[in-house]
Image: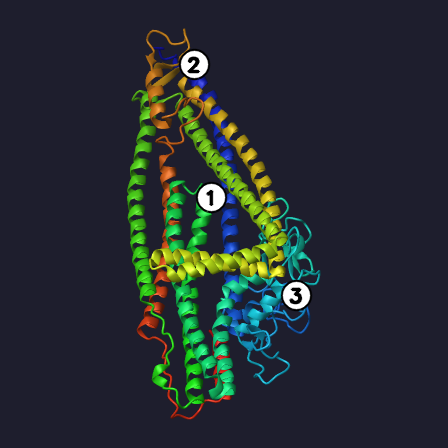
Amino acid sequence: MDSVRPLRSRSRLERGFGLLQVMLLIAVLGGLSTMGYLEWRERTAVENARLERLNLSQADQALQTFATVARRLPCPDTDRDGLEDCGGTDQKGWLPATTLRMAGADPGVDIGQIRYVVQRGAGAFDLTVLDDAWRPLEYDDDAASFFAMRETPTAGTYQANIHTLADFCQRLQEGAGTTLTADMAQVNASPARAVAYALAHPGDEDTDGDGSLFDGANAGATSMLEDPQRVPLLAAYDDIVLDRSFGALRTAFHCEILADSINTVALAHDISSSVDEMKEENIEAATRAIIFASIGAAITAVETAGVVIEGISDAGNAAAEWVICIASLGIAANACAAAGIHTAAAALTAGVIIANVASIAANVTAAVLAGNALALADSSVDASSLSCTVPDLTTQVNQAKAELDDAIADRQAIVNQIAAKQTELNNAVAARNQAIANLRYWVRLGTDWSSIDGRVDAVLSSANSWGTANDSYSAAQADVQRYQDAVTNWTATRDDYANMIANRTTLISQLQSEIAALDTQIAAETNQTTKAALQQQRLEKTARLTLLQDATALQNEYNKAVTELASAQSSLSAAQSAMTVAQGSINTAQSSYATNYNSLLNAGRYQLHVGLSVYDACTTSALNVCQQNDYLTYGIIQQMLGELFGPASNIAVAPGPDSIYYRPAQIQKEIDALNDSLAAADDRIDAAQDSYDTLKAKADNPPPCNITGSGVTPMPPSAAESILINVDIKGGTR
């Protein structure tokens, strides 16, 4: 052990060393300040992006709320006063926040903060116009089909100026079937695609230096916004865009089900008119009409059962996928993304069930009208012999109740998991802190401090950097896999649509035969589980047949698949580049860790301090470095490092990702994923409760089926048409 140096010599050394300490302190503080600033800037950018997306989501919901109430979309605000400007033909401007608020829809943003482009002035599908664009279907004697259109809005006797959501749905359908032209609202994708509307948030900076916070096409006057898939890059583009296609809005407003419900009552009116014309000589045909309407109610009940089953399946899939997402610490991007999709689908089921139950009631109404017409056309018909099918919803109610119970139980299981993980996190933090304390203790051998304490801090700091780099690399790998899967899936989808286009006639005939065979199987099947599976197959084949029979829609789907494939390939290339960058970062971090690890473990001879006393210690694997009276610490320090960063094959090269040091961060990710799944579980419970309440109310109060006899005043077709018009009016307000 070294002896203490003379006082004068030590004094000069201490004065010189004090100046050096001040200089080092200034350098360290400067570095810490820079690191703090960069970390603050990164956190601020992430938080700003989250708020920007939240603003876009609120504005999107406000527009859909406005459309539900007004049956149209608002015009853009062109003078930035917050009010829509419909006088001109501008399709692009600012979100009319004040107009939305006056309509009872809060967009959650200030005036002029968001750019807004909406489809206007391009034919009948101007989405900002409130007009009578839709008519219920009517029976066509010549074509023997229920799919000929009733009189157009400009001709015929059907009441005009019935402005409902069905009219908005009609304009959306026309827009979806129209080939993109330069004057339509669109996003700058490759190729460009038409949109019903799109929104753009400018971000915080004018990254392209043109004097506007909006970048690229978002800043221009043309009816175009940037592609929502364009990745914000701080150096050139930091805008965020959200778009809604014609088809997406038709789905959001349940347009198909809305139209079907009103069309069913239109069918009743047609039956009433036909029976009035046929009178006694065609009683048999009228009887068939009643049977048709009754079967329609039963079919709709079956479809509702399918929807309930499908919704419960989606909810179950979501629960399973959240488990995978949580287990992977959020890195299993496919499972995490699918969990959100299935959760949304399960929530949407409630609205579909409600709409289908309304369709059941409409079918029963059709049977009542037709039955009354028949009874009144022939005085010899006994009203008690006529009936319409009132659907039995017992199975659906039981399924909905089971889904509600499962949703509640699954949520409680998540709550229990979070509590258990929090306890595990507390224990992991305590274990990590104790392992760090043990390392410091043995480096100092129980003394006050050692001359290599800073090397411990350096190892811990470089381990933190390696952990961050490793997380980034894992996320990049997941992105590459996700986009690779997207490329594979969209390639298969594109090829499938190409085959459908090339072989439409053959495939239509084949599907019609398969559907007919399924109908025979369904009619003969008594096992309800097997029957439900067959019905699901029939629904899928029917959807495919419908697409094949509409050449324009099929071509549009093919074009969409081509566009999505190109987007996925572009995203895959970007993800692969990001993974390369992440690989470089982890290599740099790993090299720094290895250097600092070796610097601590092979520090050589160093000093231990107890008050004014100084002792010599030595930690190294090299020969002829340590001296006889040194305290040897190599073995114990190596052991403590192993406890902190192991187990791993070679912790001198890289720390073990499952070590005590990283375990708290891993558990925190699991807790974060569990909290995300808890929010989804709450949505699932709300949707299940709505489904159950609606179905239970319909089951307890079924639609009336009262067919009267011949002793009442006859119902002329005009009265049936009056009922149809009222249903049209009320159906449109939903």
Q: Is residue 153 above or below residue 566?
A: below
Q: Amino acid at mark 1?
A: Ala
Question: Which-is-in-front pick, marks 1 and 3?
Answer: 1
Q: Quadrant of residue 8?
A: top left
Q: Residue at x 58, y 70 (%)?
A: 170
Q: Position of residue 96 (x, y in %)?
A: 58, 67
Q: Nearer the viewer, mark 3 or mark 2?
A: 3
Identify residue for label 1: 333
Q: Which residue position holds label 3?
A: 91
Looking at the rendered image, the disc whose residue lies closer to the viewer, 1 or 2, is 1
Counting other residues with Cα less than 10 Å from the Cα at mark 2, is it few (<14), some (14-19), or many (20 or more)? few
Q: Judge left or right: residue 365 versus residue 582.
A: left
- Residue 232 percent location from the top left of the image: 59, 47
- Residue indicated by mark 2: 9
Residues under labels 1 and 3: Cα distance? 37 Å
Which of the two discs, 1 and 2, labels the residue nearer the N terminus?
2
Q: In the visual, does 141 lie left or right of 671?
A: right
Secondary element under disc 3, as helix, strand or loop, is: loop
Image quadrant occupied by the N terminus:
top left
Residue type pointed to by label 3: Gln
Name which quarter of the figure residue 77 lies in. bottom right
Q: Earlier in the sequence, mark 1 or mark 3?
A: 3
- Alpha carbon of mark 3 to alpha carbon of mark 2: how far? 84 Å
The residue that appears at 30% across and 33% down in the rendered structure is 431
Can I make out residue 611 in this image? no
**Residue 216 shows in this picture:** yes
For marks 3 and 2 on the same chain, the one whose residue lies earlier in the sequence: 2
Please tell me how crowded label 1 is: few (under 14), some (14-19), or many (20+) other residues with Cα within 10 Å. many
The residue positioned 40% from the left and 65% from the top of the image is 302
